[in-house]
Amino acid sequence: MATRGSRSEKVKRIFQQFDGNRDGGLNREEMAALVVAVNPRVKFSDEQINAILDEVFRTYAEFIDPAKGLTYDGLLRTYDDGAGDVDRDFDALGLELNPEETIITKGASEASSSSIADERAVEAQKKQRTAAWAVSPNHGIVFDDTWKLVDDLEILIKRLKSKQEKVNNNSNNSNNNNADAFSDAGWSRELGPSTELSDKRIYWEESSHDYNVFVKELGVLRSKADGARSREEAFDGHMAIGRVLYEHQLFKEALVSFKRACELQPTDVRPHFKAGNCLYVLGKCKESKEEFLLALEAAESGGNQWAYLLPQIYVNLGISLEGEGMVLSACEYYREAAILCPTHYRALKLLGSALFGVGEYRAAVKALEEAIYLKPDYADAHCDLGSSLHSMGEDERAIEVFQRAIDLKPGHVDALYNLGGLYMDLGRFQRASEMYTRVLAVWPNHWRAQLNKAVSLLGAGETEEAKRALKEALKLTNRVELHDAVSHLKHLQKKKKGKKNGSGNGGEGGPFIVVEASKFKTVGEKTTLRPDLATALQVRAFQKVTRLGKCDVEGVRKEMRDNDVPVSYSGSGGPTKSIRKPNLEEILRRLLVSLKPETFQGAIKAINERILSVLDDSGSGRVDMGMFYAVIAPLCGGHSDKRKRVAFEALLWRPVNEGSSQITKTDADKYIKLLRAIYIPSHGMSEMLEVHGEEEAGSSVTVTFNQFLAMFDDPDWGFGIMSTILKLEGNDRNRHGNHVCSVCRYPIIGSRFKEVKARFSLCNQCYSEGKVPPSFKQEEYRFREYGSEAEAMKAKCVCFSGQSHKKPIAA
């Protein structure tokens, strides 16, 4: 990575290259020449050139000299805002950087001396030894006495650093061990010219005596800043102290200074923005978001003064929202940043990544391709583009894109891991294991990569290697599924040895055969039908991903009661209580408040893909909240009767039914069909078409709660599958001792389906898919379901008792 000095020098060389009349500014003609020269592959029309220049001259108005044009500082600001790539443009122009020119001095050029602190007699040596932000005309040091504070603070930090600085070169925490290996967060760290954070995170021993001494001495400097002659000078002092602390990664102390600056000038954008950055680095995403919102409010109320900073604020606000798991809301701010600054490749990359995160793959691909067009060497954008393409089924192209990301950054963990997953999906297990091996070379403690390596080796037929990889994964985590996988591998090895000795069953040449559904019979009323279980398992999987079961249905009722939604009118003219998706996300965050951010992101993705895509069939971005509440109620926590009651109340809450104790037949029919279209894929498309074709028919006919229950519980035309879902909720964590599935050989968790004649057992999944061992080929199969081992023992006792009563009495 280029240093700040070389970066600013490159911008200066570019500026000098196009400042033809040497007046210290780039007029429209000179700027047009620059735009064309750094984009040699693009054929601009005159209209496009004029539009770009209008945007630049409007956005960076405070850097425009009416007589000369855009100043050097203005051009530097455009690059700092992400409007271009300095290194790419410098190379495209064929320029060279002389080593002796990399330090900015007062007399380096007319362009720089005309705009950097020429109103103040600040010594050149200060400019050389202090970060670039300090001499920025809009965000640097204003008062001479502030320089004294900065000098004293630099001495204190140097003293502290010499005693106890710890750079994480040999830390056991591999997450911090490879700063260049992971996708860059992409957040704008600064307002204007400044150094970026160091690639290596510095860890300070905050509990040490030296650090406590430093904090006390820092307090003395803060007192001096507070004792300044004016409020403006005190503000300048605290901002400078905060910036120096931030540069040295003393984020907690920097936050204190920025907070004090906020108190001194509450309407200034800069301290709020910097405080937000500190809070984000410290992992306090919610507080970070609040500071960025204050910065946004100050920028919007400040007129054109802060207009050029809005894209940076939007980007960081979006990232802080993602930190809370609010991906749909983050998308809105990334879009705003990209609209305000169309060349902001980071905003486009983040937008694409967030869209991918909510399952909107086509839109994600478009945004990521635009980011790559603006910055072809953006490895992170290539990585996320590959993931989006894979999700769309364009696997060969995805492989090429992933490989490009790895070529750009050979140790890119995300790209290597995701490419491994793609190879696994394609059945190319050897290549997959190679990718996971490369991940582990960079991040040795990546237990998921270790587990996937074991699975890919097993798929490649390397059982011994797979077993070793699994044992390594067990050293990294003690998750129960790993123990199950080890047991599974051991059983497979025993089976393989048995076959070699001639004792194994030859079967049909495979581990199982698939039997048509009509040949699966049930014994007893409690045994679930195979098709019902297959559907219920899919719904239960969705319920687990979304964690809706953790949301008590009473919370949905409370949302309807306490947070009413304004009535709006759809295209068809009917009144609805609809809100935009980001606002819906806020409601879901309240309902699922206990979820971690990354878990909540997964929940939002599943809900957006499966529910919101159906409810927002027109693509307006708005969702009917009454229908949404009714759709999620059956999967929420609570008694089944209460769930159905809340679903009915949600339909009553809709404007067309409000104030009544009954719902319209149209609403009831539409709800049941939506429920089936969303949760029962086999009936999805046909019933979705029916739903969107009905509007007014039957609107005068009403349905009582009891009639609604009859419609809901109908096994053929309603949501009768709910009884099976409830059964899965109750027992899908139950284990059955040492019983393993006779097909997949994994320990049985959930219900156990025992074939009463052949006496083999199947797990939920294998039973639902109609799989049976090849050695038990029969005309039909009769299964009894056991929800727990206690049930099985009880049935066994009843069976023995019945047999004893049938014995003949001795004469």
Image (cartoon, helix red, strand yellow):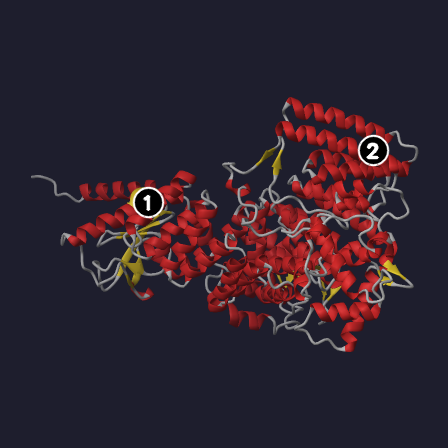
Which residue bears the numbered disc 1?
468
- Looking at the rendered structure, the secondary structure element under dot 2 is helix
Q: Amino acid at mark 2?
A: Lys
Q: Residues within 10 Å of mark 1 (few under 14, many from 20)?
A: some
Closer to the camera, 304 or 591?
304
Quadrant hosting residue 72: bottom right
Judge depth for marks 2 and 1 and give the one in front: 2
Q: Is residue 776 left or right of residue 454?
A: left
Q: CA distance from mark 2 to mark 1?
A: 61 Å
What kind of residue is marked 1? Arg
Whether residue 311 sits left or right of residue 369 in the image: it is right
Q: Is residue 704 visible?
A: no
Quadrant (top left, top right, bottom left, bottom right) of the C terminus: top left
Q: In the rendering, which numbered label is found on residue 214? A: none
Is 396 or 74 nearer to us in this picture? 74
Q: Which label is found at residue 148?
A: 2
Residue 499, quarter of picture: bottom left
Q: Quadrant of residue 609?
A: bottom right
Residue at 40 percent across and 48 percent down: it is 451
> How many numbered callouts?
2
Q: Secondary structure at mark 1?
A: helix
Name the residue nearer the viewer: 523 or 595: 595
Which percent across, then down, holds residue 464?
Answer: 28, 48
